[in-house]
Image (cartoon, rainbow, N blue to C red):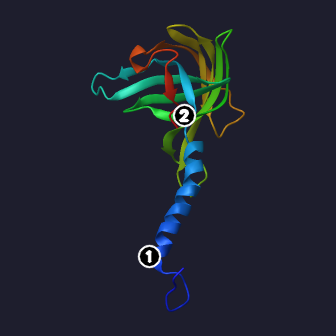
Amino acid sequence: MPTGRTGQPRDTEMKPLAALLLAACLLPSARAAEPEQTRLIGYYSNMQIEGADDPHFLSGYNIALYQRKAETLSHVAVAIGSPEPVRATVSKLTYNPKKKCLTFTAQYSAGLSTNPVKGAPDREVLKVIIFSGVVRPQSISGKVGVRDFYCSKCKPVFKRVTLKRIEEMGRTGELQAFPQ
C-alpha cells in the first residue's frame, strides 16, 4: 500500500476502506431496526367539540389498540377543553382477547400550575388515568378515573365512558407499523 511522507496510507485509499467498514457495520443494525408488523384491533374515540363560541376546544379520549404476537399495544390521547389531544404515556396495560376486557393506567400533562411550595418554580400538572372496560365490535365501554399524579393517596373520580370505533382510521386486522 503506497504511503505518504509520514508513512501513513494516503487519504484517497482510506476513503473506500472507511466506506466499506461503515456499510458493513450499518447493514446488520438496519435489519434489526425494522419494526415488527402489528395488527390493528381498532381506533376508538369520544372526542366532542366544546363551547359554542370557539369550536377549537375538544374534550374526550382517543384509544388506538394494536396486537403484536401475544402483546397488546395502545396509544391514548386526552383532551380537556384543548385545541388538540395530548398523548398519554400508557403503563400497566392488560387486554384479554377472549373476554374482551381492557385495563390500563396512563399519565399525561395538563400544563403548568403554580407550585404549592412558596418561591419554587411552577410545576407540570400531571394526571393519572385509570381505565377498565370492555372492547366491543363497534365501541369500548367502561369507566375512567382521573387523579392527580402528585397525590397518590387521592381517590380518582370515576365516570362512565363509551368510545365509538372510527372506521376511517383503519380496518380491524389490518397490518400496520406501530407508531412510536
Helix, strand or loop at label 1? It is helix
User: Pointer 1: what residue?
Assistant: 12
On the image, the x and y values in percent for residue 13 come to 48, 74
Mark 2: few, some, or many residues within 10 Å (few <14, many ≥20)?
some
| Residue type marked 2 | Ala
Q: Is 5 positioned to the left or the right of 127 in the image? A: left
Residue most extreme to the right: 153
Q: Answer whether residue 12 is visible to the viewer in this image.
A: yes
On the image, the x and y values in percent for residue 144 come to 59, 20
- Above or below, 13 against 85 in this view is below
On the image, the x and y values in percent for residue 114 come to 52, 48
Q: Is 83 positioned to the left or the right of 110 in the image? A: left
- The N terminus, quarter of image: bottom right
Helix, strand or loop at label 2? It is strand
From the viewer's side, name the closer residue of 116 and 12. 12
From the viewer's side, name the closer residue of 4 and 178. 4
**Residue at horizontal 63%, vertical 37%?**
149
Q: Nearer the viewer, mark 1 or mark 2?
A: 1
Distance, label 1 to label 2, CA atoms, is 52 Å
On the image, the x and y values in percent for residue 120 come to 57, 56
- Above or below, 35 against 134 in this view is below
From the viewer's side, name the closer residue of 115 and 8. 8
Residue most extreme to the left: 53
- Picture quadrant where residue 33 is located: top right
User: Pointer 2: what residue?
Assistant: 88
**Residue at horizontal 39%, vertical 32%?**
84
**Residue at horizontal 49%, vertical 29%?**
78
Q: Earlier in the sequence, mark 1 or mark 2?
A: 1
